[in-house]
Image (cartoon, rainbow, N blue to C red):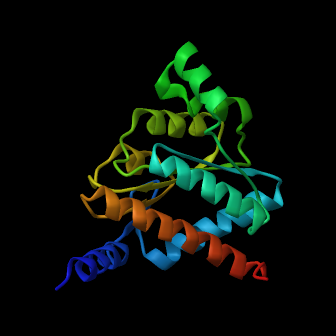
């Protein structure tokens, strides 16, 4: 089998084997979990809430991308906290692990939803963001990979875990999962043009 074919098969297998769970670590089937995310998005929109996306590195770019797509195509209020002035000020003046937690505490409220994107699920700034979101009463959706018992997955309200040790596979499948959620939400709400 060629490298390409094997890689694509590995990514597809990781998506098929994705594990979804709720805050009590109860397993949800994949369809059920995506529908819960879509339902939370609709509830959030109906009360004027905002969906916040956070991630590091490539996941940061996914956060920006999905924030833009959610606002433009999904017609929901969405934001990614990766403005360089804010990030560097919080990192320098407070601590890097507070780079997402700080703005969440300033802007977030119980009508909002936080989506964390982390290949390892253990990044200190992602874990701190989850804690800050919980403090203000937000729902938290986590996307993670690598270790099955990662901190994000333990702390989230709705968790999507990709069973792979490969950063490339985890990142690629996270992007597919994000688009799957948004496309399903748009279809459910008659937003396809």
Query: Which residue is drawn at the image coordinates 77% and 64% (left, top)?
Result: 72
Query: Is 78 or 19 nearer to us in this picture?
Result: 78
Count up the numbered dots.
0
Q: Is residue 131 above or below residue 57?
A: above
Q: Residue 38: x percent and y percent?
A: 64, 69
Q: Is residue 49 above or below residue 94?
A: below
Q: Residue furthest top?
A: 93
Q: Residue 124: x percent and y percent?
A: 41, 33
Picture quadrant of residue 69: bottom right
Q: Residue 33: x percent and y percent?
A: 51, 70
Q: Is 79 on the left or on the right of 11, as rendered?
A: right
Q: Is residue 42 above or below residue 186?
A: above
Query: Is 99 or 150 nearer to us in this picture?
Result: 99
The quarter of the picture where the C terminus appears is bottom right
Query: Which residue is drawn at the image coordinates 66% and 55% (left, top)?
Result: 67
The quarter of the picture where the N terminus appears is bottom left
User: Can you see residue 78?
Assistant: yes
Q: Is 129 on the left or on the right of 170, as rendered?
A: right
Query: Which residue is drawn at the image coordinates 63% and 77% (left, top)?
Result: 184
Query: Is 71 or 134 nearer to us in this picture?
Result: 71
Query: Which residue is drawn at the image coordinates 53% and 26% (left, top)?
Result: 98
């Amino acid at each position: 089998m060629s490298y390409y074919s094997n890689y694509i098969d590995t990514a597809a297998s990781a998506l098929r084997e994705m594990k979804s769970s709720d805050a009590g670590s109860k397993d949800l089937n994949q369809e059920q979990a995506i529908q819960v995310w879509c339902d939370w998005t609709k509830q959030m929109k109906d009360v004027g809430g905002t969906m916040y996306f956070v991630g590091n590195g490539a996941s940061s770019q996914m956060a920006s991308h999905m924030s833009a797509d959610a606002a433009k195509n999904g017609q929901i209020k969405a934001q990614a906290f990766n403005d360089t002035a804010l990030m560097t000020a919080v990192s320098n003046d407070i601590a890097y692990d507070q780079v997402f937690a700080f703005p969440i505490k300033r802007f977030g409220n119980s009508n909002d939803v936080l989506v964390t994107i982390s290949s390892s699920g253990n990044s200190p700034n992602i874990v701190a963001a989850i804690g800050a979101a919980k403090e203000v009463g937000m729902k938290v959706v986590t996307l993670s990979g690598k270790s099955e018992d990662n901190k994000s997955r333990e702390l989230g309200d709705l968790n999507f875990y990709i069973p792979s040790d490969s950063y490339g596979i985890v990142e690629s499948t996270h992007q597919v999962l994000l688009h799957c959620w948004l496309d399903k939400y748009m279809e459910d709400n008659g937003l396809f043009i």
